[in-house]
Image (tube, helix red, strand yellow):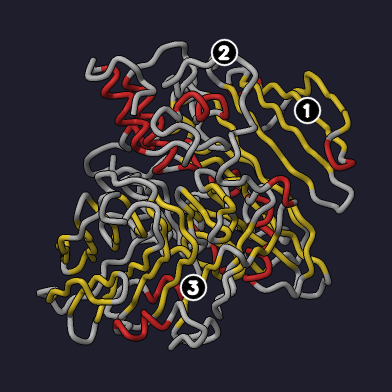
């Protein structure tokens, strides 16, 4: 940003009494890269910041980093964040542990043999910096996820010093909030950074975050709640367990009211907590339980997942299936179960659970009052750690989704028996929500942030948010054609909504119109799912003539 030129400035009125300031910049030292920054300033002191960086005509090759830096006053030393724990990069984060972490700015510096960039944090949902002598602190909440770092050095300080002893820490804190940085690769001894981990200057970059003043005494849970409400479009569910998570309900999840109460269809990403994460890895027994009403009998109907190399609970056609990944292999148990509509599976409430008994090295499936199947794992190794968040109704790694309405979703740090599970839906459960065994207890009637009643869609109401333009059904990317890449975009938006969802960070993310176009299979019932992608593929192969056919 050295010698940046301001080529335009605009002000205006935003929503909720806010004011907007937009700056248009030109960077002559970066091939005349164009940068647009919009600040939306709210009466409560929050400032939403939107960035657009366009270097498509600059001829710069690949960026090392795309982001922003703010200088915080001296004394801004205490650091907390929700993301991966240690220094990591986009090609070096599979061992990252998602959670809420605390440190200091000084501790983020690592003295490499040659002075170099350090302290980069990935998959960050929020980061907070405070001066312990002040009553207020700074919280930065990302709209999706960002990379971030906090150091007592500016990038130029690290670039200009060939050895660590030549560095002099600043009293201020340099807080970076970035779209991302290029992967590390291994060019010094082999393969250069893979293409998918590079930041090409041939595309535009967009990212957004909100700067929020908070009380300096706020805990990590309280900061997560504040950030979650920004991402929830007005609806959040409050976890009843001791972990007290606030779970935002946002696309691709769909909140609905039915005759059975409030439910969520689609997939819901569960914010990490240290306790919840630990309970689902290593030699720790657990039970994942859900009360669901299946709405279709598709190939892979996910109940819960934490990545294809960690944990998965699902139904298939006439099959119940539960697996863990342990000792370098998948350990699975399955059993035949009639999941057809004629058998009463579709449209009725079912209680299903996946159980890992670490002490006895067994995995089990429970369904509707009984243990349906169990099997030895064949190893003494525990569940492989995963950087993916626990996801209700989807596998966050493969993008496999769900055709079901979820009414309750719970996790226990214990291998529950069939009798204990059966009691959980009664007035006298074996383990109430305040039990130390309960790590997650989501009841979708327990809203943390309620939307007005008229804004909550009724299960029987037609879709009332139809874009006002002609519809080409199947055209997910809105390019005027129905092709295979439309199916690909649907799967990308389901597997990685933070990047390819409606508010995704990628410039090619699906749009509101695209989602409307893409909903071709059982249209208007559960939003877009992998069944829509399959329907588009069938249409392209000529297997069906009408893309909206059942």
Marks 2/1: CA–CA distance: 34 Å
| Residue bearing the label numbered 3 | 440
- Closer to the N terminus: mark 2 or mark 1? 1
Q: Nearer the viewer, residue 446 or 122?
A: 446
Residue located at (57% from left, 13% from top):
470
Q: Nearer the viewer, residue 231 or 140?
A: 231
Residue located at (31% from left, 50% from top):
301
| Residue bearing the label numbered 2 | 470
Give the image location of residue 186, x and y in percent.
28, 44
Give the image location of residue 61, x and y in percent.
44, 23
Up/down of 491 relative to 58, above or below: below
Residue located at (46% from left, 48% from top):
266
Q: Is residue 469 in sight in this rendering?
A: yes
Q: Residue furthest front?
A: 342
Up/down of 397 relative to 50, above or below: below
Q: Is residue 158 in sight in this rendering?
A: no
Give the image location of residue 131, x and y in percent.
76, 69
Which class describes the residues within 10 Å of circle 2: few (<14), some (14-19), or many (20+)? few
Marks 3/2: CA–CA distance: 43 Å
Give the image location of residue 384, x and y in percent.
26, 67
Marks 3/1: CA–CA distance: 44 Å
Q: Nearer the viewer, residue 293 or 106?
A: 293
| Residue bearing the label numbered 1 | 23
Q: Which of the 4 image quarters holds residue 320?
A: bottom left
Q: Secondary structure at mark 1?
A: strand
Residue located at (18% from left, 85% from top):
360
């Amino acid at each position: 940003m050295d010698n940046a030129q301001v080529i335009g400035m605009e002000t205006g009125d935003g929503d909720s009494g806010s004011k907007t300031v937009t700056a248009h910049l030109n960077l002559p030292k970066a091939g005349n890269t164009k940068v647009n920054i919009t600040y939306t300033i709210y009466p409560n002191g929050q400032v939403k910041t939107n960035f657009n960086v366009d270097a498509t005509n600059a001829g710069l090759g690949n960026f090392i980093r795309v982001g922003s830096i703010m200088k915080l006053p001296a004394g801004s030393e205490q650091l907390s964040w929700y993301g991966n724990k240690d220094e990591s990069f986009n090609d070096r984060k599979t061992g990252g542990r998602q959670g809420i972490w605390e440190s200091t700015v000084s501790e983020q510096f690592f003295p490499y043999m040659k002075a170099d960039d350090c302290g980069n944090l990935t998959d960050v949902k929020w980061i907070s910096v405070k001066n312990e002598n002040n009553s207020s602190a700074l919280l930065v909440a990302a709209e999706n996820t960002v990379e971030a770092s906090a150091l007592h050095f500016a990038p130029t300080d690290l670039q200009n010093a060939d050895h660590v002893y030549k560095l002099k820490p600043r009293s201020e804190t340099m807080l970076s909030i970035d779209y991302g940085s290029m992967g590390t690769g291994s060019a010094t001894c082999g393969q250069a950074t893979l293409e998918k981990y590079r930041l090409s200057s041939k595309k535009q970059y967009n990212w957004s975050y909100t700067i929020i003043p908070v009380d300096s005494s706020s805990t990590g849970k309280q900061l997560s709640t504040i950030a979650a409400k920004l991402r929830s479009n007005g609806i959040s569910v409050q976890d009843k367990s001791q972990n007290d998570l606030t779970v935002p309900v946002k696309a691709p999840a769909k909140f609905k009211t039915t005759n059975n109460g409030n439910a969520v269809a689609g997939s819901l990403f569960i914010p990490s907590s240290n306790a919840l994460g630990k309970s689902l890895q290593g030699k720790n027994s657990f039970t994942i339980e859900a009360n669901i009403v299946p709405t279709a009998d598709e190939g892979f109907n996910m109940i819960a997942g934490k990545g294809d190399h960690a944990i998965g609970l699902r139904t298939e056609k006439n099959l119940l299936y539960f697996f863990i990944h342990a000792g370098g292999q998948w350990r699975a148990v399955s059993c035949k179960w009639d999941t057809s509509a004629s058998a009463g599976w579709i449209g009725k409430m079912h209680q299903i659970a996946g159980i890992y008994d670490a002490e006895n090295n067994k995995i089990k499936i429970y369904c509707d009052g009984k243990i349906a199947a169990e099997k030895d794992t064949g190893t003494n190794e525990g569940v492989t750690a995963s950087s993916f968040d626990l996801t209700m109704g989807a596998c966050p790694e493969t993008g496999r989704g769900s055709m079901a309405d979820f009414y309750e979703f719970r996790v226990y740090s214990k291998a529950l028996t069939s009798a204990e599970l059966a009691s959980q839906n009664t007035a006298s459960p074996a383990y109430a929500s305040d039990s130390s065994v309960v790590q997650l207890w989501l009841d979708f009637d327990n809203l943390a942030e309620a939307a007005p009643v008229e804004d909550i869609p009724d299960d029987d109401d037609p879709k009332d948010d139809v874009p006002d333009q002609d519809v080409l059904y199947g055209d997910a990317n809105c390019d005027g054609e129905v092709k295979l890449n439309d199916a690909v975009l649907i799967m990308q938006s389901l597997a990685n909504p933070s990047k390819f969802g409606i508010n995704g960070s990628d410039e090619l993310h699906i749009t509101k119109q695209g989602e409307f176009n893409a909903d071709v299979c059982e249209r208007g019932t559960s939003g877009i799912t992998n069944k829509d992608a399959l329907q588009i593929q069938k249409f392209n192969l000529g297997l069906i003539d009408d893309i909206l056919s059942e």
